[in-house]
Image: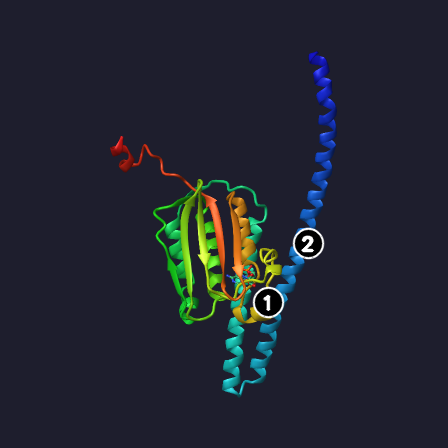
């Protein structure tokens, strides 16, 4: 009887092995296609600011005796080079995260600190539009992860909330514990996202309104970075939106639950 059960197992194992191989090749090919696509997209996206800077520097040289024109062209050169710098930085960030491999050495990350940095980072843009960015108390929540990645992800969500909101509105950034996870929510009263595009906004370089983008200076990479951070942390990012009323993004990450033994308050209760 043992011999039979062994051979009975060999057959399915053998066929499963073949299947795994086939899947692996498909995955390999897909990864390769995605990489080629990414390189093509990056090259395309880099060409725009690089081309603009080149034209503007020629314009500056031609306009040498018109101080006002020189000022106008060099201001635009500054904007374009900032855009270029942002793009390069986000491409590097994204290619670091690309594998979605789980984090190597996750550590406790204080959610309060993350929200504070994210709000600070968006302060200049928010002030310029008189947008109030408010945070709720996070009651000392702690997640398990990489502080830089988590901060980048939350900052991207807050920056978007500010970018896609009208002046004089409010952005609310809060966090709460849900089933062993921490859910960070960023709620805005902004332009919202059309139903038929909401699926696509996490794709690299995808923008709902590319024309508007030139002015907001976005790269189209922010949300794909958020998505990858969620994946490497074993969490997820979700969105609800009503066009014309606003959007809510939630980033859910694994919580570190305080150890009751080392928690002095709990100890006293025993
Ligand atoms: P970027 O903001 O640099 O364009 P993202 O990847 O962060 O790139 O966002 C992709 C697109 O999703 C944006 O271009 C915008 O159209 C849409 N979007 C993201 N966040 C919001 C938001 N809070 N409100 C409305 N639209 C948003």
Q: CA distance from mark 2 to mark 1?
A: 25 Å
**Toward the viewer: 151 or 92?**
151
Ligand 1 within 8 angstroms of badge 1 C-beta: yes
Q: Residue at x 58, y 49 (%)?
A: 98
Toward which corner of the image does residue 206 lie, by quadrant?
A: bottom right
The crowding category of the residue bearing disc 1, from other C-alpha atoms within 10 Å (few below 14, some 14 to 19, many at least 20), is few
Q: Residue at x 73, y 20 (%)?
A: 8
On screen, residue 161 versus residue 1, left or right, reads left
The number of numbered discs placed on residues in the rendered structure image is: 2
Quadrant of the rendered image holding ligand 1: bottom right
The quadrant in which the N terminus is found is top right
Compared to residue 179, the image places residue 125 above or below, namely below
**Toward the viewer: 100 or 261?**
261
Q: Which residue is mark 2?
A: 36
| First in sequence: mark 2 vs mark 1 | 2
| Image x and y of residue 226, in percent | 52, 53
On screen, residue 268 versus residue 73, left or right, reads left
**Toward the viewer: 93 or 118?**
118
Q: Residue at x 65, y 64 (%)?
A: 44
On screen, residue 125 versus residue 208, left or right, reads left
**Toward the viewer: 22 or 235?**
235
The crowding category of the residue bearing disc 2, from other C-alpha atoms within 10 Å (few below 14, some 14 to 19, many at least 20), is few
| Image x and y of residue 157, in percent | 48, 57
Disc ID at residue 157: none
């Amino acid at each position: 009887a043992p011999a039979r059960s062994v051979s009975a197992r060999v057959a399915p194992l053998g066929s499963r092995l073949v299947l795994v191989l086939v899947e692996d090749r498909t995955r390999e090919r897909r990864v390769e296609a995605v990489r080629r696509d990414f390189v093509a997209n990056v090259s395309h996206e880099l060409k725009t600011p690089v081309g603009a800077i080149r034209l503007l520097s020629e314009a500056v040289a031609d306009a040498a005796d018109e101080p006002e024109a020189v000022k106008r062209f060099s201001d635009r050169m500054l904007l374009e080079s900032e855009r270029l710098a942002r793009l390069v930085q986000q491409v590097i960030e994204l290619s670091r995260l690309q594998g979605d491999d789980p984090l190597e050495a996750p550590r406790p990350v204080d959610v309060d600190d993350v929200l504070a940095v994210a709000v600070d980072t968006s302060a200049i843009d928010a002030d310029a539009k008189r947008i109030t960015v408010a945070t709720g108390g996070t009651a000392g929540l702690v997640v398990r992860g990489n502080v830089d990645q988590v901060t980048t992800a939350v900052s991207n969500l807050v920056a978007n909330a500010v970018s896609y909101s009208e002046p004089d509105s409010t952005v609310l950034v809060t966090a709460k514990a849900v089933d062993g996870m921490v859910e960070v929510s960023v709620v805005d009263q902004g332009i919202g996202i059309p139903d038929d595009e909401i699926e696509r906004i996490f794709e690299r370089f995808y923008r709902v309104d590319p024309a508007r983008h030139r002015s907001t200076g976005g790269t189209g990479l922010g949300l794909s970075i958020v998505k990858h951070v969620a994946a490497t942390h074993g969490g997820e990012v979700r969105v609800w939106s009503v066009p014309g009323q606003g959007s809510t993004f939630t980033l859910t990450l694994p919580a570190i639950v305080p150890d009751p033994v080392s928690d002095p308050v709990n100890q006293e209760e025993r």
